[in-house]
Image: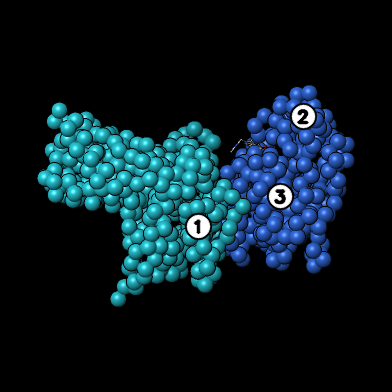
Amino acid sequence: MVREFSRPKSLLPENYLYCPGCTHGIIQRLVAEALDELNLTPKTVGVAAVGCSVTNFHLFDVDMQQAPHGRAPAVATGVKRVLPDSTVFIYQGDGDLAAIGTAEIVHAAARGEKITVIFVNNAIFGMTGGQMAPTTILGQKTTTSPYGRNKDVEGYPLRVSEMLATIPGAVYVSRTSVHNPKHVNRTKKAIKKAFQVQENGEGFAIVEVLSSCPTNWGLSPLDALKWVEEKMIPYYPLGEFRTPSEVTN
Amino acid sequence: MPEKAFMKGNEALAEAAIRAGCRYFFGYPITPQSEIPHYMAKHLPRYGGVYLQSESEVAAINMVHGASGAGARVLTSSSGPGISLKSEGISFLAGAELPAVIANIMRGGPGLGNTQPSQADYHQATRGGGHGDYKTIVLAPYSVQEVVDLTYKAFHLADNYRTPVIILGDGFLGQMMEPVELPQMIEPEDLPSKPWATVGKGRRTRNIVTSLCLPPEENDALNRKLQKKYNLISEKETLVETYLLEDADYIIAAFGITARIALAAVDLARKEGIKAGLVRPITLWPFPEKELAKSAENAKGILTVELNMGQMVDDVRLAVSGKAPVKFYGVTGGLFPTPKDILTEIKKLEVAVNG
Ligand SMILES: Cc1ncc(C[n+]2csc(CCOP(=O)(O)OP(=O)(O)O)c2C)c(N)n1
Ligand code: SF4
């Protein structure tokens, strides 16, 4: 029997703490596949953020540091400045990156830090119990916006990729989704590009991946994927917002 | 022949760090420590190092986390408000057992306070400053030469114990110029390797730098390991200097710049026939409890002098444990007691003791 589908080498057979149907697991797997395929594992240093992905430093088979909430871009900056030839990636949720860590991500981009950022946008604070995130869409009910996010009270959701794309140092900025296999494949390509940009020494690269949180959205895993497609994508359009001409598929 | 120079305290701190093999500095401007980043920005590139001005002190301390985790000797410096912002990060450094040197050139507080010399961050420094059960080694120089020597030593202590070390100076020490002897240059390549660092796993098993311990037993084990380390540090690294203690009736306890003024006060008191002496903690944590307890045995009274409203005096009282009366005298944020002021306080103490 030929085994067609197996665990990427860069991912360890540890306990995964994600809820059933959560797409964090898919995204994490894509990162590991990209590291494998680009042969980056031996020289990679990953930085885990705080959120549902907090334990992913146990899961990637690479050297890892675990950063305080929101500070992964700063920790990654420290690593990369000491080890300019290494490959440095960070994996952050939307509370981590777009709320508490807004300054760190903007300035890492402004400095053109040669790091790869995987930004998992699930429109909610997953880990702490489904509170409103800066990315929570208008009308979305969360434990801290129980009547639905209202622009007059909570303001508008933040489009991080569009904002970062205005910064010259951010040379690759892309938003993808993992709600169906076609988009999973596109996300994989984007993540690989984001690593290639770093390898080419071109600058800061970020892939924002729209992800589901069935638990805190109160939806079945399938309905959650539909919600990504029908509710999130209209507000968070997919595509490449910046791409260096040198980067090829 | 040792190299000599005439330097400001802040510049001397920066030069000593470079000589200790530090090639990375991350920081955010704040008075009265700015000569440290200025010096680093000018000189680090010459050594192939990196000076990076971060977007905030929060970012700076986390850059320190990354750089230290990657195996480098790294420095950051700040003052009052900036150190408050760094406190979460310092707790993470302690928890992840990362070496780092953090200079706090203290200014007046609380809040924005003022930019004048002060010792108001004693409690913050010696109690860890951030959340959780941890300590940092706290070194308190009292001359520019000691700034050099203790900074050089701080990097060694940080690496040796894998712990953050605070250099607790003040604006006066940072700004004043004195002649110094500079130590030998250490090249980073000559430092012992750090097999725990995250540098890319190559062919070995992966390294993880973290303070996260989700299972309670793991968290308990980490805390016990840290306490063991802190006990060892207390046992081996406590530093204290004393002056004319042998026959002293009245002891002044003071650290940093205040100890310098206190020295003159001891001489003044002796001239007037009062047997005064000085205890100067050099490590504020670990605190030289034994030395203080011993000196209190034959003393009639102890006067703690600080540039704050009374912080180290708590540790003095704990150490002395009722063996002698302990009084406090202090001024804040840019004010200084003169040796005469201190002598007046000693006389008051004398009256209080003798009734
Ligand atoms: C300084 C600090 N504040 C708050 C928290 C609590 N906290 C942990 S995770 C989190 C939100 C995570 O949300 P997100 O980044 O969206 O990740 P997700 O869990 O949704 O994957 C918060 C607020 C913390 N760990 N540290
Ligand atoms: S809470 Fe949401 S984001 Fe977190 S693991 Fe569960 S489904 Fe995923």
Tell me: residue A55, above or below residue B6. above
Mark 2 surroundings: few (<14), some (14-19) or many (≥20) residues within 10 A: few
Quadrant for the C terminus of chain A in the image? bottom right
Q: Secondary structure at mark 1?
A: loop
Confirm or reject: label 1 Cβ below 8 Å from ligand 1.
no
Tell me: residue A210, above or below residue A186. above
Q: Position of residue B97 (x, y in %)?
A: 46, 48
Q: Residue at x 36, y 58 (%)?
A: B147
How far is the residue under mark 1 from the one under mark 3?
35 Å
How far is the residue under mark 3 from the one under mark 2?
30 Å
Q: Residue at x 35, y 46 (%)?
A: B336
- Left or right of B146? Residue A243 is right
**Residue B278 or residue B16, whichever sits in front:** B278
Q: Can you tell which mark lies on residue B34? A: 1
Q: Secondary structure at mark 2?
A: helix
Query: Are the residues under badges 3 and 2 in a single subunit?
Result: yes
Amino acid at circle 2: Val
Lower position in the chain sequence, tag 3 or tag 2: 3
Amino acid at circle 3: Ile
**Residue A94 or residue B88, whichever sits in front:** B88
Q: Secondary structure at mark 3?
A: strand
**Residue B247 or residue A119, whichever sits in front:** B247
Location of mark 3 (residue): A118
Chain B on-screen colour: cyan
Q: Which chain is blue?
A: A
- Left or right of B336? Residue A60 is right
Mark 1 surroundings: few (<14), some (14-19) or many (≥20) residues within 10 A: many
